[in-house]
Amino acid sequence: MTLGRKLFLWLVVAPIAVILAIQLYFFVQIWWWVDHNPTETSFMKHQLSLLREKNPDAKLQFKWVPYNRISGNLKRAIIASEDANFSVHDGVDWDALEKAYEKNEKRGKVVAGGSTITQQLAKNLFLSGERSYIRKGQEFIIAFMLEQLMDKERIFEIYLNVVEWGNGVFGAEAAAMHYYGVSAANLGASQSARLAVMLPRPRFYDKNPGSVYLARRTGLILRRMGSAELP
């Protein structure tokens, strides 16, 4: 084999093979989760490792509950707050991304993300929290895989069970118990709206429950919940 061919294999073929192998891993894992519940996510592992740096015995608050045991109030509140077009988009809401970009350009900093529920789930399941074009591109690919292999209800069910809701608090059941001492099935409209508003910055609002913005935004989501379309 010539030196040029060896260099081609190492510099071109090998990286492509690695990338394809990673995508195949994501695909197979998502396929498994179509009818098996995740017990942890990449983001959960990362947060637990951070907690254990301070407390070696730290554990996450997490308990899986099926979709029909999560309050409809919470489902509507999250869609109203996070992704109004969840039931109709293909994993990426391009209009929302464009609006977020324009808002960030106007403010001169990142103040809006435009990520859909599917994209947020993709990040939580597999990726880190770093901001880069490579990670965002991978997020798009995983979101596409999720939409192709799962129906909307299954995507939303997994999201509701693994999303972060506070320092070491993951999923609707743990959040309902942590903040209100009730099960996810029994969350009221106001409680649900408040939990939905917490999602972009859950650890901040866990420590700052008296936030004026949290109260004001909760009222807005309450008004929007009635028009939220569930999968």
Image: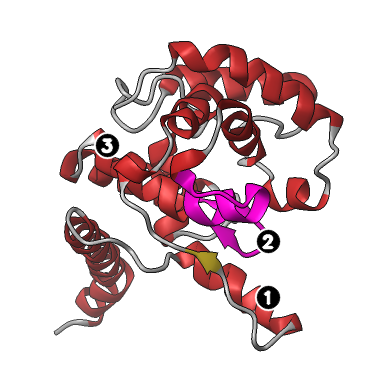
- Residues at discs 2 and 1 in contact (Cβ within 8 Å): yes
Does residue 171 appear anywhere in the picture? no
Up-down relation of residue 220 to residue 167 (above or below): above
Q: Which three-letter amino acid code belongs to the residue tagged 2?
A: Asn
* Relative horizontal placement of residue 145, taking residue 128 as reference (left or right): left
The location of residue 11, given as percent across then percent down, is 33, 70
In the rendered structure, does residue 172 fall within the stretch colored magenta?
A: yes
Q: Which three-letter amino acid code belongs to the residue tagged 3?
A: Glu
Up-down relation of residue 206 to residue 25 (above or below): above
Identify the magenta region: 163-184
Give the quadrant of the C terminus: top left
Q: Label 3: state its secondary structure.
A: helix
- Please name the residue that numbered disc 2 is placed on: 167
Q: What number is the disc on residue 209?
A: none
- Please name the residue that numbered disc 3 is placed on: 153
- Residues at discs 3 and 2 in contact (Cβ within 8 Å): no
Does residue 5 appear anywhere in the picture? yes
Who's the residue at 63% across and 27% down the image?
190
* Relative horizontal placement of residue 91, taking residue 48 as reference (left or right): left
- Please name the residue that numbered disc 1 is placed on: 51
- Compare residues 103 and 6 and report the one nearer the observer: 103
Residue neighbourhood size for the residue with mark 2, other residues' Cα within 10 Å, grouped as few (<14), some (14–19), many (≥20)? some
Query: Which quadrant of the structure image shows residue 69?
Result: top left
The location of residue 56, given as percent across then percent down, is 67, 88
In terms of sequence position, does the residue under pointer 2 or pointer 1 come before the other? 1
In the rendered structure, does residue 152 fall within the stretch colored magenta?
A: no
